[in-house]
Image (cartoon, rainbow, N blue to C red):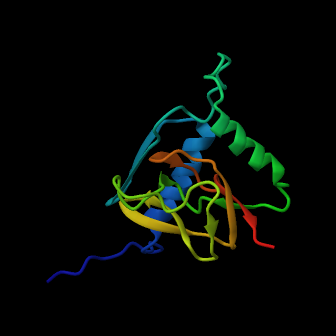
Amino acid sequence: MAKRRRQPGASEGAPVELARKLGLLLTELGLSEIDVTIGEVRVRLQRGGVPVSAPPALAPGPAVTSVERSAAASAAEIDPASGVTIEAPMVGTFYRASSPTADPYVSEGDLVKEGQILCIIEAMKLMNEIESKVAGRVVKIFVENAHPVEFGQPLFLIDPAR
């Protein structure tokens, strides 16, 4: 059985590192898709939705419901300095539940424990569980289910237990 020779300097994490760098480039240049092949490694990243560099829509949005107002009010009550923001540790797709038919891990207003699973981020066909860094109450969920997220993008705002 023939062994595959690794190129000097190549590491097992090279595709992941390449994907991270390409993800940053994707955001920086406002691209919606990028496909790169280096040797035997091929990485293709595709962003759904609107490019990051797109200007915000100036058209009037839908009317704000009382539920949205109460969520916005409760988020405004939390001093951002005292709230803990859980950020995306990687580029991927955000999922609030383990399957499309399952209940979400958490909802706004839920109490969470440190280490409790908040969501899943799918990256390169791997499901990564994102856990809470603190115990407290989920004040705001910033991302819609099944939407793409960027590295460092805020996912949740948690008011820590006092």
Check the picture and name the quadrant holding the N terminus.
bottom left
Counting labels gives 0
Residue at the farthest front position: 66
Q: Position of residue 66 (x, y in %)?
A: 66, 34
Q: Position of residue 103 (x, y in %)?
A: 42, 58
- What residue appears at the point 46 percent right and 71 percent down from the top-left corner? 13
Residue in front for this viewpoint, 11 or 87: 87
From the viewer's perspective, is 31 left or right of 40? right
Q: Position of residue 86 (x, y in %)?
A: 66, 61
Residue in front for this viewpoint, 58 or 89: 58
Check the picture and name the quadrant holding the C terminus.
bottom right
Residue 72, picture quadrant: top right
Residue at the farthest top position: 59
- What residue appears at the point 52 percent right and 51 percent down from the top-left corner? 22
From the viewer's perspective, is 4 left or right of 39? left
- What residue appears at the point 64 percent right and 59 percent down from the top-left corner? 87
From the viewer's perspective, is 77 left or right of 28? right
Residue 67, picture quadrant: top right
- What residue appears at the point 52 percent right and 36 percent down from the top-left corner? 31
Q: Position of residue 99 (x, y in %)?
A: 35, 58
Above or below, comparing residue 21 to residue 137 in the picture: above
Above or below, comparing residue 7 to residue 94 in the picture: below
Residue at the farthest left position: 1
